[in-house]
Image (cartoon, rainbow, N blue to C red):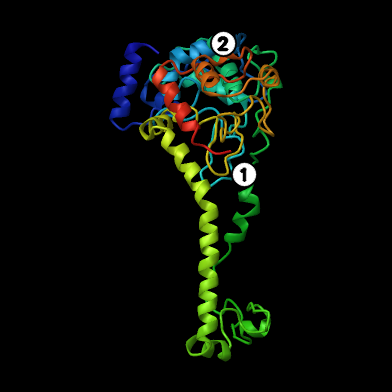
Amino acid sequence: MSKSLNLLAGTALAAGLIAGPAMAEKLGLGRAALPEEIAAWDVAVQPDGTGLPEGSGDVLTGEEVFADKCATCHGEFAEGLDSWPVLAGGEGTLKDRRPVKTIGSYWPYLSTVFDYVHRSMPFGSAQTVSVDETYAITAFLLYSNGLVEDDFVLTRDNFTEITLPNADGFYVDDRPETEYPLFSGAACMTDCGAEVKVTKRAVDLNVTPEDPDGRPAGTLPALTMAAAGTAAPAEAAASEAATEETATEETAAEEPAAEEAATETAAADPALVEAGQKVFKKCAACHKVGEGAKNATGPHLNGVVGRTAGTIEGFKYSKPMTDAGAGGLVWDADALTAYLENPKGFVKGTKMSFAGLKKEEDRAAIIAYLGTLAP
């Protein structure tokens, strides 16, 4: 569309006119778009691969392009920064109270990834990513979600062979047929239901829990109540003494464990641990920690310090990582320092896409924090 046509259209819109095809003809505004003009903007890609352009891109190239054009918002390894969305991890969280919706956990079709990157990204510079770069970024995001290996190359030919984990998690909205008819009739305003009468108490229906002696739960027999107030002071004193003795024994048993825990906690600099907890935000998209932590895109890291590499049950490690563990690699401070600085260099072939922590103080802080996490 020429500059003059654009000005005409803008003037019409500003005046509140509708510049649809019929109105355009009537008012003499604009013209029908030419096929080549439509084709220039028609970049939609469908789930079956329709609309995919010719091209290809590999994971390693995608990592470089992502770092250059996407990482300022989405983080170096798709963990998300500030309010920008996380793109990796979240597997198995959709039923949680706060699900982590990512490409790997929530998105149904890979075509949506390609289409959105190619059409709308980077933010503020839409359609500056080439076709091959889009293929590469898409391949990197697949790798970041643990769906392909680091030597994977995505092309138009193998694109539809990739199935995202949540492909079957969506279904056609059938509410117009199944639910709307239930609410479309005339509303009942009078005598809409039978009269409700109370016929029995809960205790009559056997839904009130009872103590073993047949009494309703939470009540005391009269004899017990009297004894509690007036009788058997000697028995009460003996019971109290026994309770104190038991408590003393339990306290004595717990003291060594408490002292040991206190010693371990004191060994770590609280400020360093706090700093490590902040640095760990870069890892949280893929690795879970704390009570009830489960494996996600990466293995959970509870008790990682001192653990043999590649040994968390239920997580599918890369072969190089399991081989490293079988060869004696243990995650002590030295090993973690080297790995966190350059994961791919320390364990060649690892599927962790994180580029590494370049600052020595960040590595020391995160290792101190990880050391506080019990198995």
In the picture, residue 268 is in which quadrant?
top left
The image shows residue 236, relative to residue 293, as above or below, that is: below
Pick the quarter of the image with the C terminus: top right
Residue 312's disc number: none
Question: Percent from the top left, x then y, of residue 313?
Answer: 69, 34
Q: Nearer the viewer, residue 173 or 32?
A: 173
Q: Residue 220 at x, y = what percent?
A: 56, 84
Which residue is at 62% across, 57% downward? 181
> Of 258 and 26, which appears nearest the observer?
258
Residue 187 placed where, x, y %?
A: 54, 68
Q: Secondary structure at mark 2?
A: helix
SS at circle 1: loop
In this rendering, the label closer to the viewer, 2 or 1: 2
Q: Quadrant of residue 92?
A: top right
Q: Residues within 10 Å of mark 1 (few under 14, many from 20)?
A: few
The disc at residue 345 is: 2
Question: What's the residue at 29%, 24% (across, down)?
Answer: 11
Count of numbered badges drawn on the protein: 2
Residue annotated with mark 1: 173
| Rendered residue at 48%/87% (across/down) | 229
Q: Left or right: where does residue 245 sit relative to residue 168?
A: left
Amino acid type at mark 1: Asp
Question: Is the residue marked by circle 2 packed among few (<14), some (14-19), or many (20+) residues within 10 Å?
Answer: some
